[in-house]
Amino acid sequence: MFMGFSIRRWALLFPLLMLAGCGQPEAPALDQQLYIWQRQWLPAHQHALRDSRADFSTLRVLALQSFPQAGWSRAQVDAHLLRQDGRPLIAVIRLEGQLKSLDSHEVIAQVQHLITDWQGQGLTLAGVEIDHDAGVARLPAYRNLLSELRQVLPASMALSITALPAWLNSPELPALLSSVDSSVLQVHAVSDPRTGLFHVEQTKKWTAAWSRKTSKPFYLALPAYGVALLPASSGGPIVESEVPLERDGDRQELMADPQQLRKLGLELRDNPPEHLAGLIWFRLPLANDRRAWSLTMLRAVARGEALRSQVTLQLSEHQGLFEISIINSGNLDSPWPERVTLAASACEGADALAGYSMQQTSNSLTFSRLREGRVAAQGQRAIGWARCAKIDQGASHVDP
């Protein structure tokens, strides 16, 4: 009797459950965009743009910077590549936070000149983003600049700003946000660098708070890069990013954790705060960019794929000369192996390449890591060479 009652009940409930399921579609993926932050464009941009097109909808391109002493500087973008790419473009104008004041007339004139130049090169701008790390006390002046700029921009050209969590408690924030079409909340590199680049739990709190403060779309700017900290004679450390600094001293490398960011992206997709429109990744990586995630890994994180590295040994032989490489066939960048040991016999000569040392015995070659490095997802790196009668790859191993 209980069994019959259960079957009849399920027969009645099943159509209702199906209807309820139809009314609850899977949460759509958040919009994913990219910052392009190189000041000088290179041939490698062509491949990076091509390989990023399927996963990132919009390009936010560093276009113009204003420095306290040096004045205005244009990024040397490749207009042909951007025309060929065809994705919506947002020109980013960086106003350094150390500027003593904001000359609204000069800023607006520079922005208008930039727009005219880009349009003359066949580029259609979807918007302009102002990136200015204004102190809280200077937010009223910043708001006035943005209001004036919004008035002179075409109605079809969106105005956005890079925003800081430090502004959350300012009474000026609502008025500032009302003067633009959208905001980009930067949640990386906004705290003492000694505590790390990025903190997931703090990011969640900031995102929820920003959602309550704005009535317009906002994005999160997330890190896909690393920096190095160098000791300073006084005060906090010196931060070395994509441009190497000619300074001595041990470097402490920091890298955004892809596993953390993948998990955060999935959580935000499944339960997005109100007004969150998408994620913007800093920055588009180029081949051999030593302080950025590989593009393969960035795409995997943006998609929410499970991440794993798979580092193996690869030998290429020609007339007894072996090139010894490590290859990563996974989608997660991996540290260089600490040690690679080869079962080798009758070796006439062998040596390591930069970053490794080599020790030889009568039946083995051992390559030991001398410094930190990464093998990009779907990438490889040569670590040495050997001229031997035989290398038994099956008896060789990579550790770890």
Image (tube, rainbow, N blue to C red):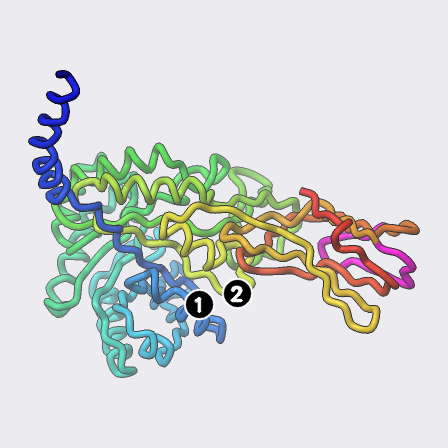
Question: In terms of secondary structure, where does tag 1 sit?
Answer: helix
Q: Quadrant of residue 388?
A: bottom right
Q: Furthest residue to the top?
A: 1
Rendered position, 7 above or below 101: above
Q: Residue at x 92, y 59 (%)?
A: 346
Where are the magenta residues, as a range? 344-359
In the rendered image, residue 351 lying in the magenta stretch gets the answer: yes
Q: Position of residue 129 (x, y in %)?
A: 26, 60
Q: Residue beneath label 2, please?
A: 287
Give the position of the C terminus as an image quadrant. Answer: top right
Can you tell which mark lies on residue 21? none
Give me the C-alpha separation between circle 2 and circle 1.
8 Å
At label 2, the amino acid type is Ala
Q: Position of residue 353 (x, y in %)?
A: 75, 60
- Does residue 66 appear anywhere in the picture? yes
Classify mark 2: residues with Cα within 10 Å, few (<14), some (14-19) or many (20+).
some
Q: Nearer the viewer, residue 366 or 234?
A: 366
At label 1, the amino acid type is Ala
Q: Residue beneath label 1, please?
A: 48
Question: In terms of secondary structure, where does tag 2 sit?
Answer: loop
